[in-house]
Amino acid sequence: MRQIVLDTETTGLSAETGDRIIEIGCVELVGRKLTGNNRHWYLNPERESHEDALKVHGITSEFLRDKPKFAAIAEELVEYVGGAEIIIHNAAFDVGFLNKELELVGKPGFRSFVDNVIDTFAMAKEMFPGKRNSLDALCDRLEVDNSGRTLHGALLDAELLADVYINLTRGQEALLIDASPQDAVTGIQTRVDLRQFTLPVLLASEQEAAAHEEVLAQLDKASGGKTLWRIQTREGGSEPVA
């Protein structure tokens, strides 16, 4: 699957009252791996940033004066994200701004160009209820190095969020079986009769069993209680199969 981790910086907090996008950063993942096929734009918003927003991103109007307007990059943006799954932290904010920018150039809403939008803020709230789930907080919790983040920047934040997302979903990745033809073993295959061996049975320690149950609990929480083994337990009364 092709995924795009996306972040924006804006002149303020409200697209509906005239605030505009000043920076877009996109990081591509294919098969959960960084490809390096990223995109980054600074944009001339044709207005000043609010003082509080300027303190967050530090991108001045003087710097943006010779940058392209959104209309000049709109087609490149929608072609780049086309058909991909989009990963955004607090997606409602960024998608709201993208919708307004696309509306101003006569294009349909952002979601009409993409396959799906994943909100990592909502995902983190489910996984870590009652805890701070800002990008900085998640970087600290998941041991993602954000030491270079003194100010917000769309491309840097998208790169950090890509690492955060991979760590948030690492338990799911471990359960995937990659059966792609490129990884198939070719050549001579030798059959071995295992009946001639006495194979030892290694039982999990208490610590290993507890760690296993913790991973299952996190996966069940992230899926909203829709994991197969929990459903079977509730419906059939049997023990979960692990």
Image (cartoon, helix red, strand yellow):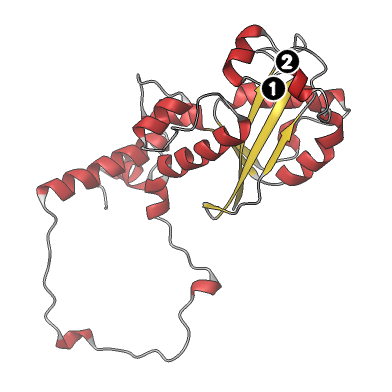
Toward the viewer: 149 or 16? 149
Side of 218 relative to 13 (left or right) = left
Q: Secondary structure at mark 1?
A: helix
Query: Which residue is rendered at x = 50% and y = 29% of the image?
Result: 149
Q: Quadrant of residue 136?
A: top left
Tag 1: amino acid: Gly
Would residue 239 be seen by someone viewing this image from the given angle?
no
Q: Secondary structure at mark 2?
A: loop
Query: Which residue is rendered at x = 41% and y = 30% of the image?
Result: 138
Query: Which residue is rendered at x = 70% and y = 28% of the image?
Result: 23
Q: Number of numbered discs present?
A: 2
Reply above or below: 155 against 35: above
Q: Quadrant of residue 68?
A: top right
Side of 197 relative to 227 (left or right) = left
Q: Would you say the residues marked 2 and 1 are in contact, meaning their CB atoms lie under 8 Å apart?
A: yes
Mark number displayed over residue 96: 1
Side of 212 relative to 21 (left or right) = left
Residue marked by disc 2: 15
